[in-house]
Image (cartoon, grey):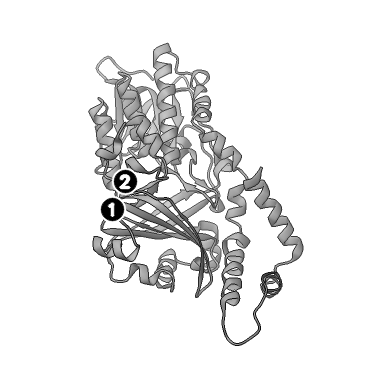
Amino acid sequence: MTASPTQEQFDVIVVGAGPAGSAAALLAARAGLKVLLLERGEYPGAKNVSGAVFYGSAILNELIPNWWEQAPVERYVCRRDISFMSPTTAVALDFRCAGAGYATAPYNGFTVLRPKFDRWLAAQAEAAGAFLLTSVVVDDVLRDNGRVVGVRVRREQGEIYGKVVIACDGVNSFLAKKAGLQREFHQHELSLGVKEVVGLDPAIIQDRFHLTGNDGIAFEYLGAITEDVHGGAFLYTNQDSLSLGVIGQISSLVERRKRPYELLEGFKAHPAVAPLVRGSKLREYSAHLIPESGWAMKPKLYTDGMMVAGDAAGFCLAAGLYLEGMNYAMQSGLAAAETAIQACQRGDFSARALAVYEKQLKQRNVLTDFRAYRHAPAFVNGARLQNLYPELIARSMENLFRVNGAPKQKILPLAYRMTRQLEIKPGQLLRDAYQVARSYLW
């Protein structure tokens, strides 16, 4: 199948105007290529879950220098809390860095509302020369002698031709499946995140969270907060709202017969969380599938005429210490664009030519990070780390600090008694210690 003389042909067709797609379109357009950016929603970000932390300010600065002067940033994260929960208590690891403005402090992330941020980033691609087409459903890839040569969209004259297609269409990438690059995922490889954005007066946020200027906080929670479902929860501060939600492994939700929104209500009612959301008003409710198995679910990343990036490539690092996706999405979009630029310069769009994409992903530390932490997702999403050990930590600290007239307890005997009560066997502890070392230490 070849394009007729009357049909317009693009150098690059990018499907999906999230961080991966818009970054790819922006870089390719800057190189002088004819770029089409397709988006299913009414506008970029319309179908994205709102409220997120972007841990990748250096990446964005590479693409758009001094981005903080124009980007719709909510707050810069200068504090991260990881809390281990029992039904009534919480024990937190608290990391803080000083500073009161991007230019004066090395913040490790910033909060955004995705509809605002995605529209802004897509607008940068448009300003560079990319053509943005919204409200477009892509149904299939077009092939010519086995090579992907474009996409078929659900509208009149729906065949659009391009030398390279970059699929950035989300975790259940329809295009990646159509091109034979992505297999069907198992339920234990995917999680469902349900999220609310709740409005709160900026002055109350400043006072309640002890913030100054545009400083912000990212809270992450493990343990009884999701009951017996494998998952976790989060709460992020925005300018005049909070983003909060619960993430549950799909297989665990099905097995335990739990409804995500019920877990979310329980999360908001927990004694450690309820005071933080008191007086807030619901603005938005949304849900989103998250790829959480990392290296194990990585698809084939390229074929003749096509590459896969972002969530479509499974580039979400859910490794306990790290819960990052937007930064890897953007890095993979940039790597795909760099590969497409080289392919157009050489006039070679074969799989052999596009294999450079994997080299670019390694140079940008995407595949490097995912391979290094390839053992972490299975351990992190396991029942003991998700549900048992957080409760062990929280209950041990609860007993340690209890003042009731009884003799004071020392830490090791107390921990031993708690492991016995929770029926944690010594051999199990040793095996899990090995998994921790394999996942994070070497």
**Are the residues at dot 1 and dot 2 in contact (C-beta closer than 8 Å)?**
yes
Q: Is tag 1's residue or tag 2's residue first in the polypeptide sequence?
A: 2
What is the x, y in percent for residue 241?
Answer: 28, 59
What is the x, y in percent for residue 269?
Answer: 40, 73
Distance in Å between CA atoms under marks 1 and 2: 8 Å
Residue annotated with mark 2: 101
Residue type at the position of mark 1? Gly
The answer to which quarter of the image holds residue 198 is bottom left
Left or right side of 257 for 34 = left
What is the x, y in percent for residue 162?
Answer: 35, 22
Residue 21 image label? none
What is the x, y in percent for residue 227?
Answer: 52, 69
- The foreground one among 341 and 117 is 117
Residue that lies at the very extreme toward the right in this rendered image: 427
Which quadrant: the N terminus? Answer: top left
Q: Is residue 390 above or below residue 296?
A: below
Task: For label 2, count other residues whose C-alpha is less than 10 Å away and answer few (under 14), some (14-19) or many (20+).
Answer: some
- The foreground one among 31 and 287 is 31
Residue at 41 percent of width and 32 percent of height:
333
Residue type at the position of mark 2? Gly
Residue at 72 percent of width and 56 percent of height:
431
Q: In this view, does 332 lie above or below 290?
A: above
Residue annotated with mark 1: 213
